[in-house]
Image (spheres, helix red, strand yellow):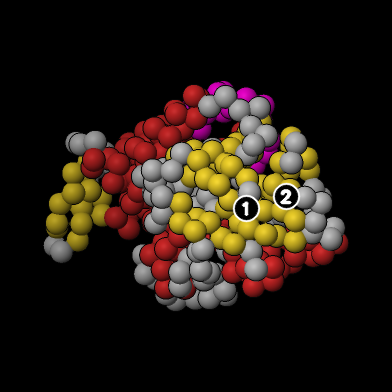
Amino acid sequence: MELKKVKGNTYLISPDFIDLGLYRLNKEQCLLIDSGFHKTAKNEIIPFMEKNNMMVRGILCTHGHIDHAGGNNLLKMTYGAQIAAPYVENMLGENSYNMYVLSDNLRFRIFGETIPSFSYKTDIVINPDYTDFYFLGVDFQIIKIYGHSPYQIGYITPDNVAYLGDALLSESMIRITKLPYIFDVGNDLASKKNLKTLNCDKYILSHKGVYDDIEYLVDQNIDHINSRIEILLDILKEPMYFEDYTADIVNKLEIKADLRKIVYLQRTVRGYLSYFQENNLVDAYLDNNKILFVKK
């Protein structure tokens, strides 16, 4: 792993499959935007900091998913790093059980050892009405990119570099992501459209890469989601129970699924079904004590 300069004091590091923002406070100190998995912090970030004689003073979280905030607790314990996280998103990390909200309370061991090591204490909550945020002597602008998660936010550094979390996927990630996870599809689409109003010099995507311009990429992401919406609605031409619907989606999109992926996929499908019902596209009925969905 290497330190890649984006502009000014804004850098990125690329452990595992994610790009994390790094803002240098001085030669020896930095803050991170997101922290990756717990194992990412343990096996890659901390050794990297030791090798380069640096320490993490703070972490700005974009949202509470485990691949973005899983390293928070370890970095806090190691460096005394302050953690700032968006409203609601911060609560996912308060204890291990909150993470099960993301898996529909399925507590059997599909997650390995990741969840017990996830818990962390947020030092500063970034409220929804904030438009900028002063952290460790640095003024960051806040970008509201709700949708992928309830209150996901992005950050614009003083170098006019935007870190966009999971608001957009790169072109290569779009090609391999069969059904993007979205908590609130309507908000997500609106957030993506609003990204076109930004006028930053560089844009960093968690998954993945640095872009000079994102207008075309925004359109690609929106087109990809709309194509998934069309496919999911087409599958519902006939009334279907949820488990059967999920199975048909797996087959239609040729998803290589195991138990863990099915749990995540069902959570993803519920997000799309909620969007369909909110927009009067799908009805739900109770049939023999099972929920039956049908396209209108």
Q: Picture coordinates of residue 291 (x, y %)? A: 20, 57
In the rendered view, does 227 fall on the left or right side of 209? left
On screen, 156 above or below 85?
A: above
Identity, as a three-letter code, of the amino acid under mark 2: Leu
The part of the image, by quadrant, that contains residue 173 is top right
Q: Magenta segment range?
A: 207-223
**In this orientation, does residue 173 appear?**
no
Residue at mark 1: 136
> Does residue 285 sit above or below 163 in this rendering?
below
Q: Counting other residues with Cα less than 10 Å from the Cα at mark 1, is it few (<14), some (14-19), or many (20 or more)?
A: few
Tag 1: residue type? Answer: Leu
Q: Nearer the viewer, residue 47 or 16?
A: 47
In the figure, is residue 30 to the left or right of 244? right
Q: Pinpoint residue 176: horizontal percent, then vertical percent.
A: 59, 42
Query: Dot 2 lies on which element?
Result: loop
Disc 2 or 1, which lies upstream in sequence?
2
Q: Residue at 20% across / 52% down in the picture?
A: 292
Q: Residues within 10 Å of mark 2 (few under 14, many from 20)?
A: some
* Residue behind mark 2: 25
- The residue positioned 61% from the left and 56% from the top of the image is 59
Residue at point 63%, 49% (across, down)? 137
**Residue 99 placement (x, y as % from top left):** 44, 66
